[in-house]
Amino acid sequence: MSADTQLTRTQRDDLRTVAGMIVPASDEYKVPGADDAAIQADILATLGRDTKLVTAALDHLARLAGQPLAELDTAKRDAVAQEFRKNGGAAAATLVRVVLQCYYRDDRVLRSLGLELRAPFPKGYVLPDGDWSLLDPVKARGGTLRRAP
């Protein structure tokens, strides 16, 4: 089940607001904030096992704010965020980790950091399609039988 259906509309709005507070957009570096629609979609699509802690963090934020976080002015939001950082515990840490991991795998962010949009191996060496010669030493070893635990 997608986190999009597990979180209420208010929780999704608060998640977007918090993400934008954690990583705001930068015109200077030409990167979106973590509240960008594509990054938010990635967060919701990959939340998985972290859904429970993120929901707890969003509920904690809502209690501290007394209303949806997205409806607060900037000064009040910052005050709520400061209080949340002090006593948010594992839920707060999970919320921040989830936002950052999705943010830093966005292609636009990777480009702004000067990273290539591909796996680092083979570092510029192109392997011909169908060339399985790298496996020859493995094939030469023969099978290995081991007892299952």
Image (cartoon, rainbow, N blue to C red):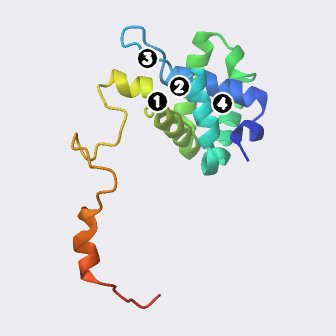
Crowding near the residue tagged with mark 3, few <14, some 14–19, many ≥20 C-alpha atoms within 10 Å: many
The reply to whether dot 4 and dot 2 touch (C-beta < 8 Å) is: no
Crowding near the residue tagged with mark 2, few <14, some 14–19, many ≥20 C-alpha atoms within 10 Å: few
Look at label 4 and name its amino acid: Leu
The reply to whether dot 4 and dot 1 touch (C-beta < 8 Å) is: no
The reply to whether dot 3 and dot 1 touch (C-beta < 8 Å) is: no
What is the x, y in percent for residue 110? 37, 28
**Residue positioned 23% across, 42% down in the render:** 123
Q: Nearer the viewer, mark 4 or mark 1?
A: 1
Look at label 2 and name its amino acid: Gln
**Label 1 SS:** loop
The numbered disc on residue 106 is: 1
Crowding near the residue tagged with mark 1, few <14, some 14–19, many ≥20 C-alpha atoms within 10 Å: some
The numbered disc on residue 93 is: none
Q: Is residue 55 above or below residue 40?
A: below
Label located before the other in sequence (1 or 2): 2
What is the x, y in percent for residue 94? 54, 42
Label located before the other in sequence (3 or 1): 3
**Label 3 SS:** loop
Look at label 3 and name its amino acid: Val
| Label 3 sits on residue | 31
| Label 2 sits on residue | 82
Q: Nearer the viewer, residue 19 or 107?
A: 107
Look at label 1 and name its amino acid: Asp
The numbered disc on residue 61 is: 4
What is the x, y in percent for residue 49? 62, 51
Label located before the other in sequence (4 or 2): 4
**Residue positioned 66% across, 45% down in the render:** 51
In this picture, residue 73 sits left or right of residue 26:
right
Distance of mark 3 from mark 1, alpha carbons?
A: 10 Å
